[in-house]
Structures are given as C-alpha cells and as structure tokens.
Image (cartoon, rainbow, N blue to C red):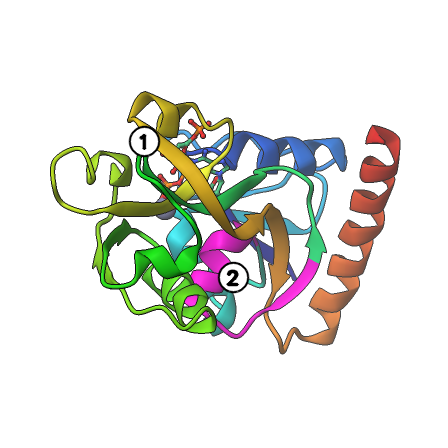
Amino acid sequence: MNLRIAIQKSGRLSEDSLRLLNDCGISVKSAGSKLRTQAENFPVEVYFLRDDDIPQYVQDGVADIGVVGENVLYEKCKNVEVVKPLGFGKCRLALAVPRGVEYGSVASLEGRRIATSYPFLLESFLRQHRVEAEIHEISGSVEIAPGIGLADAVCDLVSSGSTLFMNGLQEVETILESQAVLVKNTELENSKEIILRKLLFRIDSVQAARR
Ligand code: PRT
Ligand code: ZN
C-alpha cells in the first residue's frame, strides 16, 4: 500500500516540495518527463501535477495528500483537510493600483474594473467590504492589465514586489497571506493514515532542524 502524494510538476513549489521529501529521507527524483514515480525507500508514490489541479485530485481521492499554495487551495474551495503549513512558497494576494493614483480605502474601488486570476477570493474580499467592482478574470500576466487599459486595478500574488514595481503599480491591500500547505483527503483509509503519520513525524523533525 502506497500513500499517493501530489506535488507541482514544474513551478515555484516543485523544488521545495521535492527537497522536503528528500530531507525526510525519501528518495524521489525530480519529475523530468515522468508524471508519477515510486519512492525507493518509503511507501510513497509521487504524482507530478499542475498546482491548480491538486485540490481537486486530493478531494476526489485520486491522490491521498498534496502540497499546494493556500492561495490556490482557498480559491478552489475544495473539501480537503489542511494538515500542516510547510513554510515555503510564501507570498500574498494583494490589490494594487497604478502608482500616482490616489487610494484612500477599499471604497475607492467602487465601480472599478479589477483584473485577477483569483475571482473567488477577490469577490469575497470585496463583499466583506461592501464594495461592488467589476472583476475581470485573466489567467496570467495580470500586472499589465492597467497599463493596456484593461483594468483600473489588479489583484495578484506578490512576493518581492518587483513585478508590481516594474509595471508601475503600488500595492494597497493584502487579501491573503499564503504559503504552501500539506493537504489530505478527508477519508483516508487507516493503512494510509499510518504512513501519513510516519511522514508527518519526519516532516516535524526536518522543520525543527531547519529552525
Ligand atoms: O504550471 P502550474 O499551474 O503548476 O504553475 P503556475 O504557473 O500556476 O504557478 P507558479 O509555479 O508560478 O506558482 C506556484 C505557487 O507558488 C503559487 O500558487 C503560490 O502559492 C506560490 N508563489 C509564491 C508564487 C509567488 N510566490 C509569486 N511571486 N506564485 C506566483 N508568483 C508570481 C506572481 O503571480 C507575480 O507574477 O510572481 C510574480 C510576482 O513576484 P514578485 O517577486 O515580483 O513580487
Ligand atoms: Zn497553476
């Protein structure tokens, strides 16, 4: 019996996800062209997926556990259990407006057009602040939207802030602080729970050693 773990195939979480497994003494090679691989010395099979698909796969039990950013997890609203924050992939989902635009509060976005890849999280944030705005969902390069007249503001992930800066934008609100988390299917069978517990024990040791 294997615990099936889903991690991002290639992107910002891939290296840290693999490093975590390796630091736990689980030898897994990076994805390459493979979409799944069996660890050599631990009952774990690794699936390499797009990060956006991981919550669904874990919810449906196609994978037992997964590593995914909270931003993706909460945008997708899937029914999975968060087991542990992992301390990498840190970023924030933030609102930004063109530099030079005067920004008082969220209320100043009333009636404005906001470009984002996170329509659900943005919508919830606006509703909470009783602001009505037009949400334009775009899947990438959100930061160029104001510059090309597509939107008045953006809601996107920020880490260093340099992408916003390069595109003439200033950050004005934080909507969500995010990091990678370990999630699990809500109905794991017992034999898999036992493997997961062993894995968590190792992750705790790795995290303690890193501190
Ligand atoms: O192909 P796949 O769908 O799997 O990957 P992806 O392209 O959707 O995701 P990827 O690899 O870009 O990001 C994976 C996860 O990393 C995200 O879901 C976040 O949880 C986390 N993460 C951490 C980030 C960033 N930091 C980040 N800075 N994801 C994206 N960015 C982007 C941001 O969208 C913006 O374009 O980086 C740019 C801003 O960076 P700064 O440093 O200039 O502020
Ligand atoms: Zn993605």
In magenta, the rendered stretch is 67-83
State the residue at coordinates (62%, 41%): 39
80 in magenta: yes
- Dot label at residue 184: none
Q: Which element is circle 2 on?
A: loop
Q: Position of residue 1 (x, y in %)?
A: 65, 62
Q: Is residue 19 visible?
A: yes
Viewer-side residue, 2 vs 77: 77
Question: Do the numbered discs 2 and 1 sit on residues whose CB atoms are within 8 Å?
Answer: no
Name the kind of residue labelled 2 in the image: Ala
Q: Earlier in the sequence, mark 2 or mark 1?
A: 2
Q: Closer to the observer: label 2 or label 1?
A: 1
Q: How many marks?
A: 2
Q: Which residue is mark 2?
A: 63
Q: Is residue 171 left or right of residue 143?
A: right
135 in magenta: no
State the residue at coordinates (51%, 35%): 14
Residue 165: image quadrant is top left
Q: Is residue 47 visible?
A: no
Outermost residue to the left: 149
Q: Position of residue 9 (x, y in %)?
A: 43, 39
Q: Which element is circle 1 on?
A: loop
Q: Residues within 10 Å of mark 1 (few under 14, many from 20)?
A: few
Q: Which residue is mark 1?
A: 100
Q: Is residue 160 left or right of residue 23?
A: left
State the residue at coordinates (74%, 59%): 196
Q: Position of residue 137 (x, y in %)?
A: 23, 56
Vertical position of residue 16 compared to residue 66: above or below:
above
